[in-house]
Image: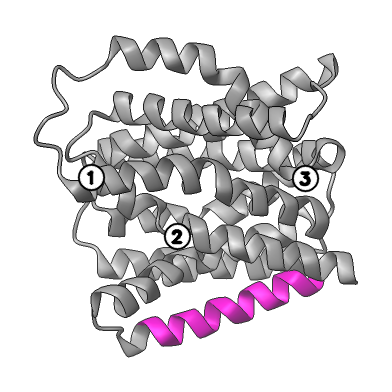
Amino acid sequence: MQTNMAGWGSGLLGVIIFSGSLPATRLAVGHFSPLFLTSIRAVIAAVLGAMLLVLLRQSPPQRQDLWSLAIVALGVVVGFPLMTALALQHITSAHSIVFIGLLPLVTAMFGVVRGGERPHPAFWLFSITGSALVAGFALSQSDSASLDGDLLMVAAIVLCGLGYAEGATLSRRLGGWQVISWALVLSLPVMAIFALVVWPATLHNISLPAWISLGYVSVFSMLVGFVFWYRGLALGGIAGVGQLQLLQPFFGLLLAGLLLNEPVAWTMIAVTALVAACVAGAKRFA
């Protein structure tokens, strides 16, 4: 029981950190190209991950783990950041939440395929209901739509769900922060070359908020958040803890209300309560 609760607590911290990722990416792509943003954030995070591995004297992964690490890198180091950066050129971050609401369901599906989990049938009812509530709420708050942006977000969600489930399964053997660090290091040579190829002609006139956003998605979205997230998925279960992602959009809106004094509508509070109930139900039957 204590291990399960530790997993949910760690997963919740990961979700809170991830809640600022899409708004920060949306702000950053106004000043950096999606290709440069995707590659440079991976390079920055990989350097930090490599430093951790060296300082804490971690043994290299086994040969049989390299394929799983490659899947993690494809899903969360390259795929999701690139697809969302491209999508956010066509849609708003608010509209993208429509698809983030589907991520817990996709993660749970990959948890069955890659992690061998078998949730109770009632779990799927709570998961689908929660996903529908988040997507419906986000859609009602957004007037931005684009076929290109929507298709890119669908691809991002599939790749991310795969990366989450694969990384969580591997974390049971290697540890959460080790998995994301090794995945980043594995992708470093390719991403470093790519960053040099797409390096902007000039970095002058880049606003301070854009630099802060780049720092956030590089350090927190790409590394720190995964330390807690993979640990949570490994301890508490991929399907169950993955449902915490349903709360991610509301954490983002809550932060906007606290930090930016943006109004928090009663509808948000009501939907959040319903989603929390779905998360609790999913936890019980996961």
Magenta region includes residue 233: no
What segment carries the magenta color? 268-286
Amino acid carrying label 1: it is Ala
Q: Which circle, 1 or 3, is nearer the viewer? A: 1
The percent position of residue 106, horizontal first and vertical second, equals 60, 48
Mark-to-mark CA distance, 1 and 3:
38 Å
Q: Amino acid at mark 2?
A: Ser
Any mark on residue 19, and which? 2
Q: Is residue 268 visible?
A: yes
Residue 69 sits in which quadrant?
top right
- On-image quarter of the N terminus: bottom right
Q: Would residue 14 be found to the left or right of residue 254 on screen?
A: right
Circle 1: element type: helix
Front-most of residues 123 and 5: 5
Count the numbered circles shown: 3
In this rendering, is residue 11 above or below 151? Answer: below
Is 151 situated above or below 78? Answer: below
Q: Is residue 58 left or right of residue 75?
A: right
Number of residues whose C-alpha sits closer than 10 Å to that of mark 1, classed few (under 14), some (14–19) or many (20 or more):
some
Above or below residue 193? Residue 15 is below
| In the foreground, 196 or 83 | 196
Q: Say if the magenta span includes residue 275.
A: yes
| Residue position for label 3 | 112
Q: Main secondary structure of the magenta part?
A: helix
Q: Element type at marker 2? A: loop
Query: Label 3 is placed on what type of residue?
Result: Val
The furthest residue to the right = 1
